[in-house]
Image (tube, rainbow, N blue to C red):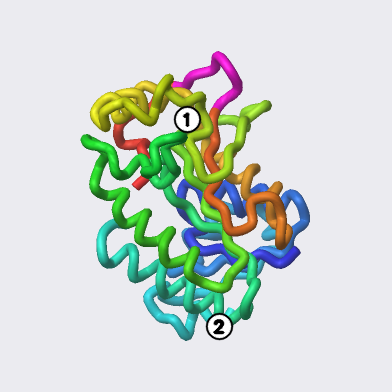
């Protein structure tokens, strides 16, 4: 399958690129710094890797081949360019964050809870932008991400928190829900390698996660340590 990858030199992007190349996908990595990208790739350079150099703020460049208003404008540019390049039903994966998932039984998103970083408002805006598009999109909404090996037995959810909801969610005050969400973060902490596997296992159009947000949690009983700087933004 042909894959066009933005952010191939980032923590998630480099894992997606590496795994995609191993799986014999044809990858075009869109980057600003070709030398930096090639320094991350095993030599000899795989024949199924192609590099396109340009600025992601230029819609024409994207069509040809992290926070706040600048971030949402960037994602809007990517969405518009994907529509122009792929047409209606074009397949696209984006990253969000666990706070963009719905709280089960509460008729709200995690971002609506107190003490949740306001940076997630940009993720909500990106979600609203892509769900209003004609693309066949999926949005991966993990908790904190760290370096590590792939995890066997990941549990995936659609649109809602992928962990068991607190009892009587619908009557709990928002502050209690926010506390419950924070307590679940070690269960939602996955590796960048895990994220790459989830995305590359679900590339096909009209699949189980078509036009859905995807939550990820560890197998029952497993928790991982994370630093506050690991929380996706």
Residue 186: in magenta span? no
The dot on residue 110 is none
Question: From this viewpoint, which residue is outermost toward the top?
Answer: 221
Classify 108 as above or below 30: above
How many other residues sit within 10 Å of disc 2, few (<14), some (14-19) or many (≥20)? some
Residue at horizontal 38 percent and vertical 31 percent from the top: 170
Q: Over which residues does the magenta segment extend?
A: 218-224
Residue 219: in magenta span? yes
Q: Label 1: which residue? A: 188
Is 62 or 90 nearer to us in this picture? 90
Residue at horizontal 56 percent and vertical 59 percent from the top: 38
Q: Secondary structure at mark 2?
A: helix
Q: Which quadrant of the structure image shows residue 45? A: bottom right
Magenta span: chief secondary structure: loop
Question: From this viewpoint, which residue is outermost toward the front?
Answer: 171
Residue at horizontal 35 percent and vertical 24 percent from the top: 180
Inter-mark Cα distance, 2 to 1:
35 Å
């Amino acid at each position: 399958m042909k894959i066009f990858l933005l952010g191939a030199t980032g923590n998630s992007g480099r894992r997606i690129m590496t795994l995609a190349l191993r799986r014999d996908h044809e990858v075009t990595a869109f980057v600003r710094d070709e030398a930096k990208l090639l320094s991350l790739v095993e030599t000899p350079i795989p024949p199924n890797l192609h590099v396109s150099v340009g600025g992601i703020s230029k819609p024409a460049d994207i069509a040809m081949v992290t926070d706040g208003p600048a971030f949402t404008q960037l994602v809007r540019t990517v969405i518009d360019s994907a529509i122009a390049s792929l047409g209606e039903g074009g397949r696209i994966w984006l990253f969000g964050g666990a706070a963009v998932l719905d709280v089960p039984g509460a008729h709200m998103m995690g971002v609506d809870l107190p003490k949740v970083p306001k940076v997630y408002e940009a993720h909500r805006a990106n979600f609203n932008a892509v769900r209003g598009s004609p693309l066949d999109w999926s949005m991966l909404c993990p908790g904190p991400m760290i370096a590590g090996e792939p995890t066997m037995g990941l549990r995936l959810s659609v649109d809602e928190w992928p962990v068991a909801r607190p009892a009587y969610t619908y009557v709990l005050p928002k502050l209690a829900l926010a506390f419950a969400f924070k307590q679940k973060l070690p269960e939602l902490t996955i590796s960048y390698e895990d994220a790459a596997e989830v995305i590359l296992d679900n590339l096909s159009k009209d699949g189980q996660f078509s036009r859905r947000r995807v939550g990820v949690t560890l197998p029952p009983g497993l928790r991982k340590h994370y630093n506050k700087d690991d929380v996706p933004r």
